[in-house]
Image (cartoon, rainbow, N blue to C red):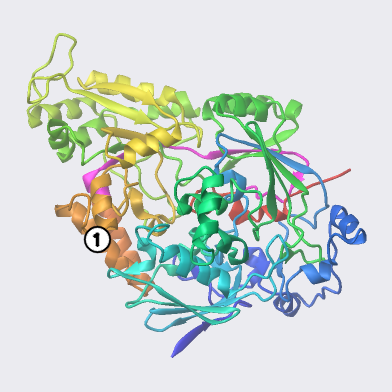
Amino acid sequence: MIRKLTMLLLSGAICLMGIIPVLAQSQYGQYATIGEYEKATGNKIKKFNEAPMLRVKVAAGELPPVEERLPEEPMVVEPVEEIGQYGGTLHQATSSPTSSLINRRTGYEPLVRWARDGRTVIPNIAKNWEISDDGKTYTFYLRKGIKWSDGKPFTADDIMFWYQDVLLNKELTPVFPPWLTIRGEPVKIEKIDDYTVKFNFTASHGLLLEYLAFHEEIFYPKHYLKRFHPRYTAQEEMTKMVKESGFEFWYQLFGEKANVALNPELPVIKAWVLKTKSPTQVILERNPYYWKIDPAGNQLPYIDRRMLYLIADAEVINMKAMSGELDFQSLFLGFQNYTLFMKNREQGNYRVLKWINPPGIPTIYINQNCKDPVLRKLFEDRRFRIALSLAINREEINEIVYFGIGEPAQALPHRMDPYYQEGKYLEYDPKRANELLNEIGLTERDKEGYRLRPDGKPLSLVAELLVGEAGETIDMWELVKSYWKEIGVKVDLKVQAPPLWVSRATGNEQQIAGYLIAGIHWAINPVGYVPTQSTTYWAPLYGIWYATGGKSGEEPTGDIRKLQELYDKMKETVNEEEKLKIGREIISLHVNNLWVIGLVRAPGLCIVKNNLRNVAENGIQSWRLKTPGYLNVEQFFFKQK
């Protein structure tokens, strides 16, 4: 028997917060098709409308009419406040030419997607789906008539190209994605027809829909990219293209051509298409073939263009936001500027939103695979980790850095996450911290008061920090340094650029890593809590061991190995109650072992110009949701007087 997920009443929606009542699709900001919208509301969409800039192109013969550009079954997106107006340029800022803001966060178009509640999986490119009762087979029915931004059809062939020619190609994908693997066996994807694909697993997969809502790129424009793939292009021509592009291998050329943030020629199905890039800015323009409309039949997006300033210095981004030069900014805003943001609201003509910030906990990752054998033994001692946590005055950090708005918190899932549990060792207790360190045997000190390691060397740690994306600052880490000094632990702080920081963290070069941790939907990318990849910053070698099936890295033991075993079980569990039980057991192990130490949870700041409307007042700041993508950025608009 097969369970069919019909989308009209959301009987097929997946809610990670437990069982939800059956609600109308409008509760989640969209209707999968016009027919479903009309049936649910009684309203008719009698004609389609388009942006003035596109009407000009249609009149000039440069584009076909809007009716021919839209699919047979456009998605109907409900505006947050009101039907919008066409026009304008959305100004934002980001730190890197490959930033997720350019196309992933504001170009969020997966097969299935997160709804605006931040919890429920609903249709997107797939208008509906079926899951076999044993959870081994998922059948997705694609929306007919979607076109790439160059006007070419989007079909099941684009998913099959991604599967057969990218995933199964060892040069492009040396390690098959673990999220598409069950019991060591990769998924098998088959094309049923032009608009139907089937995912087949050897065992049940209980997290696939949530995974697909997060990993949006499971398709490539075959008609464009096959030219850069040796399966479809003669070797002589391939060699010539690679050489002319300055690369050594074909897969390097393919990677560049397939990069949505770097290649303006790459066709997309997103609301905006990359047009120009320079060292200082990126410009994207509306996609004339975008496949979503509003309830009045207006083709989305409302906004004509997006301009992103490329600014490496987060403080400059903050100043631009404060002066009113940015229309929408939800990343890189430092909480140290909160009072200034509030003070300058009228002059800058913006509002300051305080969004829920599940990953907004600055986190101390204690590397369990540390190369220094003496430090590693200390890091593996639970008492040492507890001592470091008890030595931190979180209330003081909250007052000094977050103006009393935040709350002390361990690096655990947010209250809105179904696996939420209260943290331990949050109290400020330097006396107990000192007792624990003495109990370990770290009783000797040098003339500066720092403890000596068992080998007689000063106990000196290096913390490598990645700061700025969520507003965390070096001032906060300086406070941590001062607290640890009081218990005789010396720390050197090193702030690094993202590429270097990531390279060192995943390469097991760090002792202590400072960054954030996922606070919601962690199960779809569990590296913060379960070593499944090298990006488990507190145990990269254990993560590599898991990701490579034991071929590389280091095999964990004890509770850390138990985390991996529990997660494997969780992936295969279709029953929601059992899945919750397993997930909470994973988090419980973290509560007690404290492999990662949290500081303070604070809201995420979001600055929005007053005339930019249809922006949710109570958003959720999360990479897992591709914020602001899950809020339907295509329905943002500038209100004209």
Q: Secondary structure at mark 1?
A: loop
x 72%, y 30%: residue = 324
* Residue 621 appears anywhere in the view: no
Q: Decide whether residue 595 is among the magenta residues.
A: yes
**447 on left or right of 619:** left
Q: Residue furthest bottom?
A: 1
Q: Nearer the viewer, residue 597 or 504?
A: 504
Q: Position of residue 338 (x, y in %)?
A: 58, 28
**In the rendered view of the protein, which quadrant contains the N terminus?**
bottom left
The correct choice, above or below, for 5 with respect to 456 in the image is below
x 39%, y 44%: residue = 517
Magenta region:
590-618
**556 on left or right of 28:** left
Q: Decide whether residue 510 is among the magenta residues.
A: no
Q: Residue furthest top?
A: 447
**In the rendered view of the protein, which quadrant contains the C terminus?**
top right
Tag 1: Cα neighbours inside 10 Å, few (<14), some, or many (≥20)? some
Q: Which residue is mark 1?
A: 549
Q: Position of residue 200 (x, y in %)?
A: 41, 78
Q: Residue furthest front?
A: 236
The correct choice, above or below, for 332 with respect to 572 in the image is above
Q: Position of residue 605 (x, y in %)?
A: 57, 37
Q: Nearer the viewer, residue 298 or 249?
A: 249
x 27%, y 59%: residue = 585
The correct choice, above or below, for 169 with respect to 412 in the image is below
Q: Amino acid at mark 1?
A: Gly
The correct choice, above or below, for 598 with respect to 400 in the image is below
Q: Nearer the viewer, residue 599 or 570?
A: 570
* Residue 283 appears anywhere in the view: yes
Q: Position of residue 610 (x, y in %)?
A: 75, 39
